[in-house]
């Protein structure tokens, strides 16, 4: 079934920031290819703008010793050019995983009468997943493009010596979200679905 969106669909772009190209992330296994994912994010943003639908940006300002800490690493906190806000696109800055905690995101979406969300960005298991779970619990249908988000490798929790590769982390995160908190689709399906809105 084709993905079709209403005129009250919004795009939420999560943490597409330069820190994910710096250490320690730069030396880690990532899936899918990060540059391809960023290209897909840029294409989706372009399609939303062409359809005159809202693009909402969420940026992470870490309070920890982390590449997204704006004080310790301003270069890492910087937004990647392909996902930079333009015009009057709103930006929310968060300090935790969810884009809804400590920000005005929920109030903004309610005031704008947004009825459907597309969520993408970085990373699949962390801020994308947490924001998607909360959006679903708050009542929004969410579409998540599998090639519009990426994940890095991770070590297992204490008590296990296992190391999980990036593809496994990405796919398991998507499997947990699909049909529970979101509908997992592709960038192509998102962009194709937006054409029906542009035609109205």
Image (cartoon, rainbow, N blue to C red):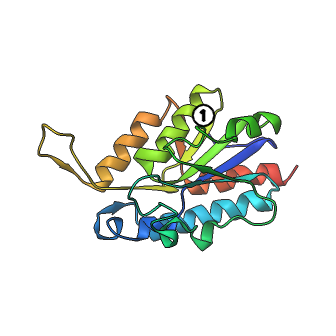
| Residue 111 against residue 70 in the figure, above or below | above
- Name which residue lies at 78% across and 49% down: 196
Q: Give how far across and how far down residue 193 sits, in percent.
A: 70, 49
Please give left or right for residue 196 compared with residue 154 in the image. right
Q: Give how far across and how far down residue 129 sits, in percent.
A: 47, 41
Q: Quadrant of the N terminus?
A: top right
Residue 183 visible, this orientation: no
Residue 126 picture quarter: top left
Q: Which residue is mark 1?
A: 135
Q: Secondary structure at mark 1?
A: helix
Q: Give how far across and how far down residue 13 sits, in percent.
A: 61, 54
Please give left or right for residue 8 compared with residue 57 in the image. right
Q: Give how far across and how far down residue 142 sits, in percent.
A: 61, 38
- Name which residue lies at 62% across and 66% down: 83
Q: Nearer the viewer, residue 170 or 152?
A: 152
Q: Nearer the viewer, residue 27 or 77?
A: 77
How many numbered marks does the figure carry?
A: 1
């Amino acid at each position: 079934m084709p993905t079709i969106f209403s005129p009250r669909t919004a795009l939420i772009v999560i943490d597409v920031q330069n820190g994910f190209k710096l250490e320690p992330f730069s030396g880690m296994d990532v899936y899918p290819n990060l540059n391809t994912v960023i290209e897909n994010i840029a294409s989706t943003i372009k399609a939303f703008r062409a359809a005159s639908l809202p693009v909402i940006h969420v940026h992470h300002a870490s309070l920890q010793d982390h590449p997204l800490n704006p004080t310790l690493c301003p270069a890492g906190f910087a937004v990647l050019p392909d996902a930079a806000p333009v015009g009057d696109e709103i930006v929310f800055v968060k300090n935790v995983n969810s884009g809804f905690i400590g920000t005005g995101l929920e109030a903004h979406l309610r005031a704008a009468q947004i009825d459907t969300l597309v969520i993408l960005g970085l990373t699949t298991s962390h801020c994308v997943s947490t924001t998607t779970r909360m959006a679903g619990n708050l009542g929004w249908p969410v579409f998540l493009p599998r090639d519009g988000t990426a994940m890095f490798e991770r070590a297992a929790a204490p008590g296990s010596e296992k190391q999980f590769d990036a593809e496994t982390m990405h796919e398991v995160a998507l499997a947990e979200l699909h049909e529970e908190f979101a509908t997992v689709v592709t960038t192509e399906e998102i962009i194709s679905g937006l054409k029906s809105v542009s035609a109205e």
